[in-house]
């Protein structure tokens, strides 16, 4: 299966208007944003757990990264309320589910094979960084290594931000609204920018909070190769 699989193209999805697609596990549904592969895949999705639903125990050979958008995500390691940002590195395992139900933005098979750095934090509790710009827009780093940079962008109402990402970029709207080129990004919109293109964001009166990852698209072909090697 291939969805938004040409990484040289700019892609946008307004996930809130997309239909839910049932997964193999009862009570778990998905809105696929990009995908290369079938059940084992390099994938980016919005996933919904109905109350009391769960996946069977499994290991993430290629790593798992997610943000809890609604409700409380759970596994044997703890409870992750709305706003949680979690990185489960390659070779980690768990039994995910949600007693009350939840919605998460999740990325699979996009880690470096040697990455063993777990991350668990809540974006709502982050201190405001000291490097806010003249418009009081700010960027909090959630994770950074030599391959990728994951951050939380907080934009004030009626402001602009220009970004020149290296290695491509991916944005997911957590709150508010922003315009990028001709497109208006609303809550839970997803945007992927190919390598070599700038980003120009402009907010309206609501401001915006945006999850952003840069650098990782430069490694996408190797990520897909690793998925295919696992399937074989």
Image: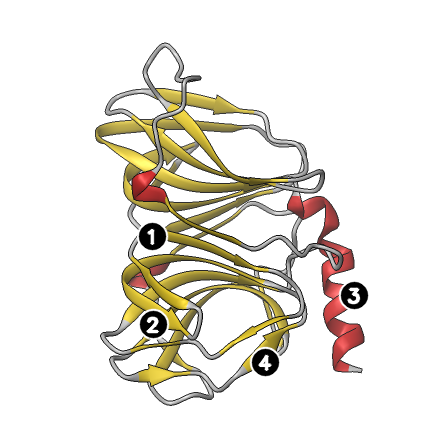
Give the mark nearest the N terminus, 3 or 4. 4
- The foreground one among 111 and 159 is 111
| Residue of label 3 | 225
Q: At numbered mark 4, what does the secondary structure look like: helix, strand or loop?
A: loop
Residue at mark 1 to residue at mark 2: CA–CA distance? 13 Å
Colour theme: secondary structure
Position of 196 with respect to 31 (left or right) is: right
Give the mark nearest the N terminus, 3 or 2. 2
Position of 173 with respect to 35 (left or right) is: left
The crowding category of the residue bearing disc 1, from other C-alpha atoms within 10 Å (few below 14, some 14 to 19, many at least 20), is: many
| Residue of label 4 | 39
The crowding category of the residue bearing disc 4, from other C-alpha atoms within 10 Å (few below 14, some 14 to 19, many at least 20), is: few
| Residue of label 1 | 188
Which residue is found at the position 42% from the left and 33% from the top? 180
Q: Is there a contact, CB below 8 Å, between mark 1 and mark 2?
A: no
Position of residue 172 relative to residue 31, above or below, is above
Q: Is there a contact, CB below 8 Å, between mark 2 and mark 4?
A: no
**If the image is split into quadrants, where does the N terminus sit?**
bottom right
Specify whether residue 36 is in view. Answer: no
Residue at mark 3 to residue at mark 1: CA–CA distance? 29 Å
Q: At numbered mark 3, what does the secondary structure look like: helix, strand or loop?
A: helix
Position of residue 116 relative to residue 204, above or below, is below
Q: Can you give x and y, in whole percent of width and height, for residue 130 in the image? A: 41, 18
């Amino acid at each position: 299966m291939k969805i938004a699989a040409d990484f040289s193209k700019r892609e946008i999805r307004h996930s809130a208007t997309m239909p839910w697609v049932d997964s193999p596990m009862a009570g778990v549904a998905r809105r696929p944003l990009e995908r290369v592969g079938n059940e084992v895949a390099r994938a980016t999705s919005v996933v919904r757990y109905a109350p009391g639903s769960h996946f069977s125990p499994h290991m993430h050979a290629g790593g798992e990264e997610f943000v809890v958008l609604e409700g409380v995500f759970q596994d044997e390691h703890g409870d992750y309320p709305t706003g949680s940002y979690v990185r489960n590195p390659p070779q980690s395992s768990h039994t995910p589910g949600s007693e009350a139900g939840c919605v998460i933005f999740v990325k699979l098979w996009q880690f470096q094979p040697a990455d063993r750095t777990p991350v668990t934090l809540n974006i709502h509790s982050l201190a405001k960084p000291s490097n806010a710009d003249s418009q009081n827009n700010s960027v909090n780093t959630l994770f950074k290594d030599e391959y990728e940079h994951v951050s939380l962008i907080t934009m004030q109402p009626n402001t602009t931000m220009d970004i020149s990402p290296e290695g491509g970029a991916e944005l997911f709207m957590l709150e508010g609204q922003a315009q990028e080129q001709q497109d208006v990004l609303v809550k839970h919109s997803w945007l992927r920018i190919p390598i070599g293109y700038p980003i120009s964001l402009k907010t309206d009166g609501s401001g915006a909070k945006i999850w952003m990852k840069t650098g990782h698209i430069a490694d996408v072909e190797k990520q897909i190769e690793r998925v295919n090697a696992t399937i074989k």
